Amino acid sequence: DVKVTQSSRYLVKRTGEKVFLECVQDMDHENMFWYRQDPGLGLRLIYFSYDVKMKEKGDIPEGYSVSREKKERFSLILESASTNQTSMYLCASSLRDRGLEGEKLFFGSGTQLSVL
Amino acid sequence: GQNIDQPTEMTATEGAIVQINCTYQTSGFNGLFWYQQHAGEAPTFLSYNVLDGLEEKGRFSSFLSRSKGYSYLLLKELQMKDSASYLCAVSDYKLSFGAGTTVTVRA
């Protein structure tokens, strides 16, 4: 089974702190994604990556950056955390293929981040 | 951009059938996905439609009409474990999700 592991289940940070969320997948997937999930808004794409050292902005990249130095690891960085970044953050991965296999996402269990 | 609409909540009785509708307006289309998410857990893949028609997988079926921008997920013979959120997602080479429909199954 594909396993996507997020480093923390719950995280509490203060406004202005720099926050790192880590994600590791063990199935040699090329594509990796960061979403945030908020009640009533669903999952919104922050950033994604199709290859090592490559990144693309999603729908809501403001206030975030990412790093992908190794194929299996994709990090989300909040440069200066703010209270409106309190959310559930979900990492996902998929194969590079077109069609179903390339778009079937495997998700981590999520990190609930609270910014106080 | 993508605009994906689905009902917020639905309630049904164990053993019954529930149909979750999803309508979408998108700039491109490369397939429609349904995911299931139990409370506090990761979403998991349920179904994928890229052509018009019905895809059946056990108790779950998914339908797509591309001309109408419409899909539904049909859950049959409901069980308590089907209580979850169901997420409709449209692909334009990256997935955009609806807000999800929370289904509560009552005994």
Image (cartoon, coloured by chain):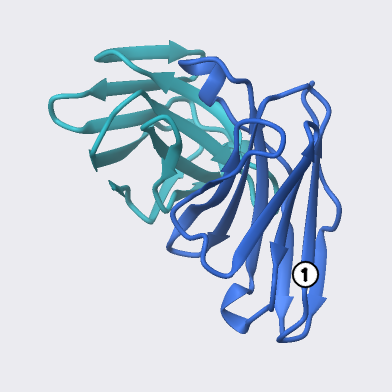
Chain colours: A blue, B cyan
Q: Residue at x 56, y 79 (%)?
A: A84
Residue B80 appears in which quarter of the rendering?
top right
Task: Give the residue displayed 72% in from the left and 52% down from the top.
Answer: A110
Q: Residue furthest left?
A: B67
Query: Where in the figure is residue A88, as x and y percent of width and height?
Result: 65, 61
**Residue at horizontal 68 percent and vertical 78 percent from the top:** A81
User: Is residue A17 depicted above or below B101 in this figure?
Assistant: below
Q: Is B52 rendered above or below residue B17? A: above
Q: Is residue B106 visible?
A: no
In the displayed structure image, the side of residue B51 where residue B9 appears, left or right: right
Q: Secondary structure at mark 1?
A: strand
What residue is disc 1 on? A19
Please state if A15 lies on the left or on the right of A40 as rendered: right
In the rendered image, is residue A70 in sight? yes
Judged from this view, the residue extending furthest toward the front is A53
The quadrant of the rendering that contains the N terminus of chain A is top right
Nearest to the observer: residue B96 or residue A46: A46
**Subunit that carries the residue with mark 1:** A
Viewer-proximal residue, A74 or B48? A74
Q: Name the residue rendered at 52%, 25% in the picture.
A: A103
Quadrant of the frame with the C terminus of chain A: bottom right
Is residue A103 positioned above or below B39 on the image?
A: above
Q: Amino acid at mark 1?
A: Val
Residue B12: % across, % down: 42, 44
Give the crowd class for mark 1: few <14, some 14-19, many >=20 residues within 10 Å: some
Where residue A72 appears, as percent x and y from the top left, is: 80, 33
| Displayed quadrant of residue A51 | top right
The image quarter containing residue B67 is: top left
Is B67 situated above or below A33?
Answer: above
